[in-house]
Amino acid sequence: MTADPETRLRADARRNRDQILAAASALFVEQGPDVPMDEVARRAGIGVGTLYRRFPDRGALIRAVARDNLARVLADARAAVAEEPTAWLALVRMLRRSVPLQLTVYLAWLSPLASAIIQDDPMTYQVRDLLVEMLDELVRAAQAEGQLRPDIGPGDVKVLVSLLLRHLGGPPDERAAQLVTDRALAIMLDGLRAQPGSTLPGCPLSSDDVNWV
């Protein structure tokens, strides 16, 4: 049985949108959010006209990439909470899967135009707030399990992730970039584990102490 034309049209439109967002996300990491729109179209394998029909200007594309990536981070985090046997493992999975996606959003903040667009978007902030709430809950639960060191707060985790994102910036060798990310995350997670170690100065940071997209 052949799908009706309207169903095929919706499927084609969805596929085009997904291709555009995937291409833009990759190019934002490689070249920044000011990458030419025709380059995005070429990477997506579509015509420039198709790109502009879906996203009439750069602002619409940046906003869509930020929303899409943060929504995927949120979906992955929810899946981790539902599927992992402990809060610590859910936190580890959330951080390992979220950093590559959050990198795209972070790089967009480096452009003044993109920063203004993201800051003006209520939907992006709604998703971010849900992620912060989930992080808060996972940190408290992992500490209650005895897996996460008790002298940190969710804000400390946010600072570490932000520092990691700030120093990535899309090296040309994707495999090397992934190795750097994996190693840095492994070191970070090892430092978060509840185990004898150095005493931390100051007090644990709450989520409200740290600004984070």
Image (cartoon, rainbow, N blue to C red):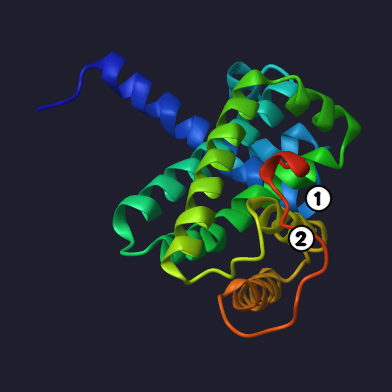
Q: Residue furthest right?
A: 112
Pointer 2 residue: 170
Pointer 1 with pointer 2, Cβ within 8 A: yes
Viewer-nearest residue: 136 or 64: 136
Mark 1 secondary-structure assignment:
helix
Q: Position of residue 122 (x, y in %)?
A: 65, 19
Q: Position of residue 170 (x, y in %)?
A: 76, 60
* Residue 197 location, quadrant: bottom right
Identify residue type, mark 2.
Gly
Across and down, in percent, residue 183 comes to 65, 78
Residue displayed at 77% across by 71% down: 200
Residue ID at (74%, 28%): 118
- The mark lying in front, picked from 1 and 2, is 2
Question: How many neighbours does mark 2 have within 10 angstroms: few (below 14), some (14-19), or many (20 or more)?
Answer: many
**Residue found at the very far bottom of the displayed protein:** 196
Total marks in image: 2
